[in-house]
Amino acid sequence: MLKVAQKTLILLCAVSLSFLAQAQTIVTIPIETEQNALVLQTDKDNRLGITYFGKKLAKSSENALISKEYRLNDSNAGIYNSAYTPSGTWSLVEPALQITHADGNTSLELKYVSHETKRTDANVSQTNIVLKDPVYGVEVTLCYKVYAKENTIEQWTLIKHQEKKNILLQKYASANLYFMADNYYLRHYHGGWGREMKPEETLLTAGIKTLDSKLGTRANLFQPPTFMISFDRPATENEGNVMLGTLAWSGNFKIDFEMDLYHNLRVLAGINPHASEYSLAANQEFKTPSFIYTFSSHGKGEASRNMHDWAKKYRILDGEGSRLTLLNNWEATYFDFDETKLTGLFKDAKKLGVDMFLLDDGWFANKYPRNGDVAGLGDWQENRKKLPNGIGYLVKEATKAGVKFGIWVEPEMVNPKSELYEKHKDWVIREPERPEHYFRNQLPLDLSNPEVQDFVFGVLDNLFTKNPELAFIKWDCNAVTYNAHSAYLQKQGLPQTHLYVEYVQGLYKVLERIRAKYPKVPMMLCSGGGGRVDYEALKYFTEFWLSDNTDPLERIFIQWEYSYFYPAVAHCNHITDWSKVGLKFRTDVAMMGKMGYDIVVSNLTDKELLFSQQALENYKRINPTIWKGDLYRLQSPWEKPFASLLYSNKDKSHAVMFTYLTTNRFDIIYNPTPIKLNGLDPNKKYSVKEINLFPGTSSSLKTDLVYSGDYLMNVGINPELSGNRTSIVLELTELK
Ligand code: GLA
């Protein structure tokens, strides 16, 4: 007995001595991209802190010196900058990790143990830093994946333990960052259906500001997990220090901005701990979602181009590929269609000149036909009355008409008025003892349940198996999660607090299976507009629906803000009859992304049809520059009554400039001064030509304009906006 005790004591000493020994060496870990660095360093107690974030130092060896320049000298010194703040011991600020151990103890300490960097290729590397609690068997690994050229860091955390029973994770952030600047200006977003991405830019003050969502399925309806922070002073498009951050998670999130006593800023981003305590078994690894961030010392424009380059190359499915133009029938027919009407629309799609016809909601369910949004969701069999010959016939007819065929699904949801609900109430997220509460007359299915995952996978798999030529999927998600209760978790004896997390993990499992079997089919991520868009979902989707609001004036602002975080190739912009604004304006606005139509083609006048056909031809020519090139925002519509943007291809030999008037007030002097271009080569000569002219109109600009890039970027060009010229598209082509 005594021997065992002695042995234990010796062992314990060895453990604590090893921690002491490590405490004597200070370890500096720079996480460096091509331009920037995040510098981490251990302190005398072997705790890991952040000592620097910003433009990379020319001499990497000087990173070790940085911490000495800070004199954070009171008894709290050194604790605020923790690289991953534990809870229940020395730190009393907002924690990154809060747990209850198997024995009920709530304290946690994290000390540096080791780190290693592995290189994937010349551009990508990953640094893993292992931290351990000296008393309890809890291990945390901070993972930093660096995309050097894109100046982007993807950070996540792995949590595991060797305790005797489960531990409870009460808060488990993805990242915990620390910034030191004179001031911090946070640009964040709010909104609702049809009003996505309303920006607010605010000076952060003492205390904690939180961005969060507790909506579950349609998590981003009121705010997305995306933001920007300008350091010292508000960054502009081309000047200032600014970081862009976003959490790659399609569920509840929480991002805290806490100003500490030294006026330094702590940022904690991760899954929302609200109602999400997670019970973790020994040796099971919990992987948090990724927090993705980039920094630029040359303003918001460069920061967003960093993120675009990263997203196109490394994240969005087929991000460097091309996309299909389409005609969608949602606003043209709503639920009111049949085979004859649809086959007529295929011909319209062909006449217009798009690549594909997209059949929207309303094609399924028989016992409770989907003739409105009140019934049928969940019953994914073709409605025999509307489509007696099934989807297969439609695919064939579309092919005959010369267009591809795509289809809408909303496989995560169910209407209580459906056969699925009647058969499988146990698959539905609902409180068994409380009245149901609906959002758009529907409820989410419980994706924590593997049977439900099979069902959702099956909806897509059946469609593809029966119709291998199916060219496109629009995946919708129109309800938030009320009454978050899972019959499955209850049956398994698992805590209900796992539901929000396991729902999202279940969704990813389904998407993973779909992509394993159908790796290439383009899919649009939609959630009653922009209720769900993030960089984890976009691993599986080629594009997303920004908003149901397709009023072009509104869209200029919505697209403008989304464009900071997501590249044009992923933006689905449709021309619809939502507003009375002229077709040219609507078309020009839709072109700054992936263009589609949701109109009644037969209602177009001859001139409108001709205009659209020509616009689609132009689009074919210019879309490689829009999708694969770089975006330069020239004039913000928040600052002047017009917006101007330019896309240039990577070798700067071709560019497209869009300018839109954003006011219809009479008493306005349009743009009296030229707009300075950006993203061109000063030494190249460009021909400048107005395109997308409405038949019968001509440009007020000369037809043979030739300028140097130098002139265009220093003097600029005046596109001559006026009440009659409210949107102008200029194509710039290098003259050799
Ligand atoms: C959501 C989508 C729309 C349309 C409808 C169909 O609102 O955002 O584009 O697909 O669902 O019900």
Image (spheres, grey):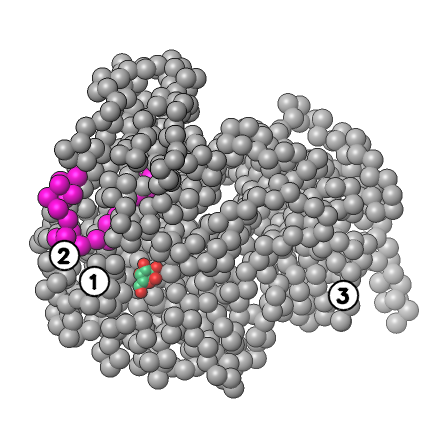
Q: Are the residues flagged by discs 1 and 2 in contact, CB closer than 8 Å?
A: yes
Q: Is residue 595 magenta?
A: yes
**The label number, if any, that marks residue 345 in the structure image:** 2
Q: Is residue 709 magenta?
A: no
In terms of image quadrants, where is residue 592? top left
Residues rendered magenta in the picture? 590-611
Looking at the image, residue 507 sits to the left or right of residue 209; the answer is left
In terms of image quadrants, where is residue 158? bottom right
**Quick one: which residue is furthest to the front in this view?**
667
Q: Secondary structure at mark 2?
A: helix
Mark 3 / mark 2, whichever is N-terminal: 3
**Quick one: which residue is furthest to the right in this view?**
2
Q: Quadrant of the N terminus?
A: bottom right
**Residue 369: x percent and y percent?**
24, 76
Q: Nearer the viewer, mark 3 or mark 1?
A: 1
Say few, some or many: other residues with alpha carbon within 10 Å of mark 1 (under 14 / 14 to 19 / 20 or more): some
Q: Quadrant of the C terminus?
A: top left
**The label number, if any, that marks residue 106 in the structure image:** 3
Q: Amino acid at mark 1?
A: Thr
- Residue at point 81%, 49% (across, down): 19
Q: Secondary structure at mark 1?
A: helix
Position of residue 312 relative to residue 95, above or below, is above
